[in-house]
Image: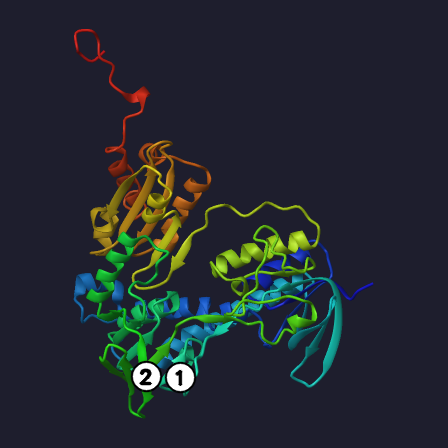
Amino acid sequence: MRDYDLIIIGSGPAGRAAAIQAGKLKRRVLVVDRKDRLGGVSVHTGTIPSKTLRETVLNLSGWRERSFYGRSYRVKEDIGAGDLKARLHMTLDHEVDVLEHQFNRNHVDVLNGFARFVGAHEIEVATEAGEVRRLTADKFLIATGTRTFRPENVPFNGHSVLDSDEFLELAKIPRSLVVVGAGVIGVEYATMFAALDVRVTLIEPRDTFLDFIDKRLIEDFTHQIRENGVDLRLGSPIGTIEDADEHVEVTLENGRHVRAEMLLFAAGRMGATNRLGLDAVGVETDHRGRLEVDRKTYQTAVPHIYAAGDVIGHPSLASTSLQQGRVAACHALDTPTLPESPWFPYGIYSVPEISTCGMSEEEMQERGIPYEVGIARFRETSRGHIMGLEHGMLKMLFSLKTRRVLGVQIVGEGATELIHIAQAVLNLKGTVDYFVQNTFNYPTLAEAYKIAGLDAFNRMPIPEEYKVKKNKAGKGA
């Protein structure tokens, strides 16, 4: 008899959900985590810290009130790094406490240390105390997440040239910042610090960014962040980065120079799999250290070894990782469960927020689906006017053949909350008629769904049952 039914390596969202699910099924489950505080990257350096930092920035800077009181308005005049980190540490302590309580009440065992496979059903855990323990299990789940990508030509020093993990511990708020990499992490931090009136330059070597987002939404977003003070430089690969003590000097391949007090390198992450000893069990990774799995069961090429979360790549969201962990645990423990929904929301916590669900307009065109578009601007809603919103847009895509909603994209205040209405309608195969028939609270930003729905409805073919019937004289019946 082996020590455990399931051993989970990593306590981020995927590991957390899997462990709690296994505990509720009354199975013997162990979570191994290299840190002495549970939560993984999501709690300590990723999702929770960056979103907490964003909320703190928007509150202390008075960002949401500036349309009424002017761009110089601030809730707190002198905002320092300590102001940002105070709320951050309170939030993280709460998250860890909740997670420890969940593990305790579900009888999940926890062991701190580095895990390494030494056999098909056996791992070795090296603890910080210098002990080495060997443990066996019927099934394993790898949920180790990712680590920052740190190329050798970037002179990281921990104070002026930082990766996204180190950035949370900054000693002071810089007066100017260069962010390299316009992916989700880079865009979030760049726009966040621009809201603090830091002079931000966002550099992306490619000619486009956030390519999985609808282009019209990105056009609107690009206009807003440039208006907010972000100097966005696309199609500009980095030549050299020089640490010049008082500042960082960046030379682009096109010959231009950028100088700033601090540089954040946020161009990619690697799967945290290099210390797992995967060779011992015959599991291979790609060039970024990520694992390939069956997306229905989350099994790797070795059937009793599962993987979930960021370590398996796209979509690399905490929300989807939670679902993946639950599904993986149920399959590993031979317990039938509900499958994942086909459509899930994608949220980017930038300033302004972006959130999408379903297909983009470009994807609809590639698939050859005849469609209609409905648009609503937040400034057109009474709630938007009350809140002083000058920007913000909701876009919906409908099939002309079935009238079903097939995609929704939102940019602006509350986008990551509003998207769940779209998610429900998408997964329940709802049509444009839903948004026309239903009443939305007034005044709310959710009313934008009604506006966008009517916008599309009025341009779509009228269903036969709603056409005005003509009599022989040509008059309405």
Question: Is 344 in front, or is 353?
Answer: 344
The spot of residue 205 in percent (x, y) is 32, 71
Query: Can residue 141 be spotted in the picture?
Result: yes
- First of labels 2, 1 by sequence position: 1
Residue marked by disc 2: 240
Where's residue 173, x and y in %? 32, 81
> What is the x, y in percent for residue 137?
74, 64
Residue 76: image location, x then y, percent: 27, 75
Q: Is residue 283 left or right of residue 374?
A: right
Instruction: Determine the residue positioned at 27% across, 34% down.
Output: 457
Q: Nearer the viewer, residue 409 or 78?
A: 409
219 with respect to 327 (left or right): left
Pointer 2 and pointer 1: residues touching (CB < 8 Å)? yes
Residue type at tag 2: Thr
Q: Quadrant of the C terminus?
A: top left
Secondary structure of the residue carrying numbered label 1: loop
Asked if residue 111 is positioned above or below residue 305 in the image, the reply reads: below
Residue drawn 26% across and 59% down?
221
